[in-house]
Image: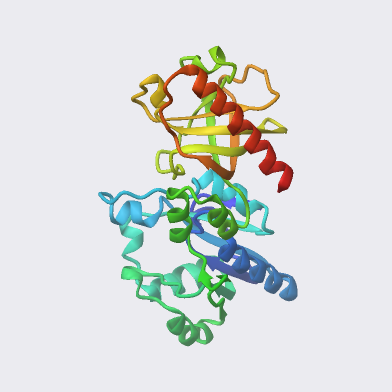
Amino acid sequence: MKIYNGLDEFKKLNFAVVTSGTFDGVHFGHQKILQRLDEITRKNGGESVLLTYWPHPRLVLFPHQELFLLSSIEEKSELLSQKHVDHLIIIPFTEEFSALSSEEFIKDILVEKIGTKKLVIGYDHKFGKNRSGSFEELKVDGPIYGFEVEEIPKQMIENNAVSSTKIRKALIAGNMDIANEYLGRAYCIHGKVIEGDKIGRTINYPTANIDIGFRHKLIPAEGIYAVKVQVEDNTFKGMLNIGFRPTFSGTQKRVEVNIFDFDQDIYGNEIIVEFYHKIRSEIKFENIGALQSQLQNDKEEALRFFKNH
C-alpha cells in the first residue's frame, strides 16, 4: 500500500476504485466496504484508493467537544495496509477543506485528482460542506462525470448496525466482548514503556507503565484486563490495569501491564497491547497481602480465559 500525505503527491489513475471516510478503528463495517472495494478492483483490473482525513473532522469543526478515537493515523494506516488497499491518501482536514461543496468534492477531487471510475460508500455516507452530499447526489452526478457508485447497506451484527460510536460506548463500559465483535479483532493500544515507581516488583507483579502518546486515544474503562502484549516480534499473555491504584493512594491514572513469564528490560520500547476480557473493576484492598492474593486470582482468570478462547 502506498501512502500519500495530501492530494499533491498523488498521480491520477486510469481506473481508480475509490472509497472515502474517517475509517476510525477500521471496524467490521469498514472491513465489509474494503472487501467490496477489493472485489470491484480485481474484477475491473483497476487500482483501489482510500481517502481518509486527518485530523479527524470533528476535532477541527468542534474543537471544544471532547472526542476520543479508536485509532491514531499510524494505527489506522497499519490496519488498512492489511486490507488489500493499493493507495491511501491522507487529506489534511482543515476548515478550508470543510468548505468544499459536495459538487466541488466530486469534480475536483474524485474525478480530476484521482480518476474515479467506481465509487464504493457505506450506508448513509455524507460528504462536502455541511455534509450535504449524499448517495442520491452521487447517483445523479456519477454518470455525468463518468463513474459508477455503489452503496454498501448497514452492516449488521445481531441486528445492531456497526459504528465507531457503538464501539466507543462498549469500550467506555469495559465491554470487550461487544467492542471486539464489532471491530472484528481485539482492541489495541500502542505506547512506549516508561519508568514508574516500581511498586509492582516489590509484590512480585512487576508492571510496564505505558505512555500512550496519542492524546485522543480512547482508553477502556478502569479495571483489570486479560491482554496480549506484542514486544518486538514476540507476543506474551498478561494482565493490565487501568486506574489510580487506590491501595497505594494513587492520584494519577495509569496504564500498566504485568507480562506473564517475562523478565526483559524494555524501558523505552514501543509495545502493542491487545484487550480481550475485563476481569474486574479496580478496588482498594485493606493490605498488600489481600492485593497479592487477588492479583494471583486475576492471573489465573486471565490464563483460563486464554485457554478457553
Residue 58 coordinates in the image, percent (x, y):
35, 56
* Viewer-nearest residue: 229 or 240: 240
Outermost residue, left side = 64
Q: How many marks?
A: 0
Quadrant in the rendering for residue 283: top left
Res. 116 in view: yes
* Viewer-nearest residue: 188 or 204: 204
In the depicted structure, whether residue 89 falls above or below residue 297: below
* Viewer-nearest residue: 277 or 122: 277
Q: Is 159 on the left or on the right of 47, as rendered?
A: left
Outermost residue, top side = 202
Residue in the picture at 42% in, 49% down:
172
In the depicted structure, whether residue 200 falls above or below residue 78: above
Residue in the picture at 44% in, 43% down:
221
Q: Is 85 on the left or on the right of 53, as rendered?
A: right
Res. 14 in view: no
Quadrant in the rendering for residue 120: bottom right
Residue in the picture at 55% in, 39% down:
225
Q: How is colour applied across the structure in the image?
A: rainbow
Residue 300 coordinates in the image, percent (x, y):
65, 33
Q: Is 152 on the left or on the right of 222, as rendered?
A: right
Residue 205 coordinates in the image, percent (x, y):
58, 20
Residue 305 coordinates in the image, percent (x, y):
66, 43
